[in-house]
Image (cartoon, rainbow, N blue to C red):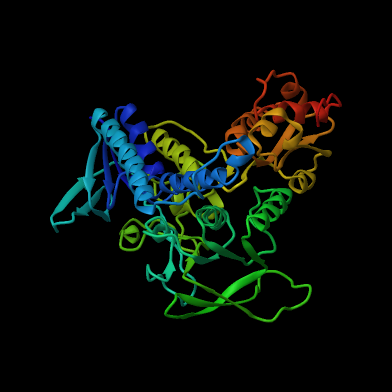
């Protein structure tokens, strides 16, 4: 008899878990209350990048004249056409996912799953009918949803979430964004490029205040945001709002999360909409976890070990339900899903978070992997860094996108690459090479001796490593 595996949630974590389990000959049932692909495909990674591409194209149109390209007039955005393009891409991806599941014989049940107890769950479908699913192993991949500001719920009109932002039928003339993390910064880039007047409010004292992201990247991004006329209020929070006929009046005050050099008075900002991007909250309510005794932390996230197993034997959890301590990234969830599936079927795999790249699709892009200089020093390494500017390379000069730099963090004794931090053109496409270098404990000499095509943006990695060993040509 094949092992029966039930997967709750069809986002990246759940999909990869289901596919891997099916390939290992398990009998798999995949339960999804919404749409295949979860947040990533339907309300996150994919649709937001369609919008980001539109913003990037708009930005490019504004500099066409530098290349001798003349347009009949200033570029304009057709939001209905953009929405159609977004839906076209999402639908094509969703159909591809459905074909894979069908080919592998994975049973897909649409509806909300409720855990009745050990080895049994009930799925309530849209029409009210119910199905019972028996399982030997359970993988929970229910995901998370946008978190509102305290006391300021989403209304979908004036106070919107990232999900609402992807469905706007017109470009807001003005927009206040609460939260300068990955999502907030990406939307700031998108809507500014599309024509909105954007004010970004971040509670910490820098943009992208994440441990994975080096402060030099944050400083460069802040400088570029200012060039794009994005107003950035750092060390500040949205205190209250007042709805108006035109949108919202937002009161902004000093953040309690940073020590202010000199307290500033509250200020105001008026906008058509307030977009809240301050994090996510788990989608676990009403799932019946209490019927199994799955342990939850103080913030409501599921606890799981490095094998992705929860406090209950044969019950696993992957993806956003694990919270920010395990990195809430689609590609991390995918690896967690595969790890959970393999362990559920008798293997002994450990999920590694040692070399996780972080990619941010702002203009310019930001990408990081490994340790920052400070983290490396704290870990006891004899640390050195080198930096190369994109403007020193041929390809950025050709394209006209010369902003940014790449930095390598390495150990002076062993020459081992400990981290790479990039802000600039194609950063998100370059970072996989750096990720492999960090994961395989490669040295800067290894990288310097690796031939790169010319002219390419990826040459910055070779030049960076060459500079670290005293063989720089351009840097």
- Left or right, 53 with respect to 284, comes to right
Q: Classify 293 as above or below 49.
A: below
Residue 48 percent location from the top left of the image: 45, 49
Give the percent coordinates (x, y) of residue 22.
31, 31
Question: Residue, x 34% and y 61% (percent of image)?
Answer: 290
Along the line of sight, the residue nearer the viewer: 70 or 166? 70
Front-most of 282 and 163?
163
Q: Residue furthest front?
A: 72
Q: Residue 316 falls in which quadrant of the image?
A: top left
Residue in the picture at 53% in, 49% down:
326
Q: Look at the image and tell me in which quarter the N terminus lies.
A: top left
- Could you tell me which residue is drawn at 45 percent across and 75 percent down? 247
- In the image, residue 254 sits, relative to residue 423, either above or below, namely below
Q: Is residue 139 visible?
A: no
On the rendered image, what quadrant is the C terminus found in? top right
Q: Is residue 271 left or right of residue 466?
A: left
Q: Residue 116: x and y, percent? A: 25, 56
The one nearer the camera, 285 or 59, is 59
Q: Is residue 150 visible?
A: yes
* Whole-percent x, y for residue 336 in the image: 46, 40
Above or below — where is 302 with respect to 85? Answer: below
């Amino acid at each position: 008899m094949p092992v029966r595996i039930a997967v709750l949630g069809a986002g990246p974590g759940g999909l990869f878990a289901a596919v891997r389990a099916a390939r290992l000959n398990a009998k798999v049932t995949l339960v999804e209350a919404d749409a295949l692909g979860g947040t990533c495909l339907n309300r996150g990674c994919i649709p937001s990048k369609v919008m980001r591409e539109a913003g990037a194209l708009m930005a490019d149109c504004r500099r066409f004249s530098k290349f001798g390209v003349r347009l009949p007039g200033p570029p304009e955005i057709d939001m209905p056409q953009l929405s159609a393009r977004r839906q076209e891409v999402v639908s094509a991806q969703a159909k591809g996912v459905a074909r894979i599941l069908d080919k592998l014989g994975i049973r897909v049940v649409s509806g909300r799953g409720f855990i009745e107890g050990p080895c049994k769950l009930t799925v309530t479908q849209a029409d009210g009918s119910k199905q019972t699913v028996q399982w030997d192993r359970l993988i929970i991949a229910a995901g998370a949803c946008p978190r509102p500001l305290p006391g300021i719920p989403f209304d979908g009109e004036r106070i919107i979430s990232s999900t609402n932002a992807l469905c706007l039928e017109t470009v807001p003339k003005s927009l206040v964004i609460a939260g300068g993390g990955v999502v907030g910064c990406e939307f700031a880039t998108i809507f500014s490029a599309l024509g909105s007047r954007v004010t970004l409010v971040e509670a910490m004292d820098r943009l992208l205040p994440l441990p994975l992201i080096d402060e030099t990247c944050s400083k460069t991004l802040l400088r570029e945001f200012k060039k794009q006329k994005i107003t950035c209020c750092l060390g500040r929070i949205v205190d209250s709002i007042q709805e108006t006929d035109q949108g919202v009046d937002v009161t902004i005050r000093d953040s309690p999360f940073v020590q202010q050099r000199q307290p500033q008075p509250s200020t105001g900002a008026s906008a058509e909409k307030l977009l809240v991007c301050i994090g996510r909250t788990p989608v676990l309510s009403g799932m019946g976890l209490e019927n199994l005794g799955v342990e939850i932390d103080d913030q409501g996230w599921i606890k799981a070990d490095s094998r992705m197993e929860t406090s209950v034997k044969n019950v696993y959890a992957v993806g956003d339900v694990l919270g920010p301590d395990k990195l809430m990234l689609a590609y991390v969830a995918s690896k967690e899903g595969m790890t959970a599936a393999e362990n559920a079927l008798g293997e002994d795999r450990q999920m590694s978070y040692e070399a996780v790249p972080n990619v941010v699709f702002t203009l310019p892009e930001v990408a990081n992997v490994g340790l920052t200089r400070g983290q490396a020093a704290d870990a006891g390494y004899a640390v050195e860094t080198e930096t190369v500017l994109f403007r020193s390379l041929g390809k950025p000069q050709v394209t006209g996108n010369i902003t940014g730099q790449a930095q390598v963090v390495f150990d002076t004794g062993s020459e081992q690459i400990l981290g790479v931090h990039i802000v600039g053109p194609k950063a998100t496409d370059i970072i996989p090479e750096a990720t492999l270098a960090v994961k395989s404990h490669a040295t800067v000499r290894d990288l310097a001796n690796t031939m790169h095509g010319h002219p390419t943006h990826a040459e910055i990695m070779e030049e960076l490593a060459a500079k670290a060993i005293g063989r720089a040509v351009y840097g």
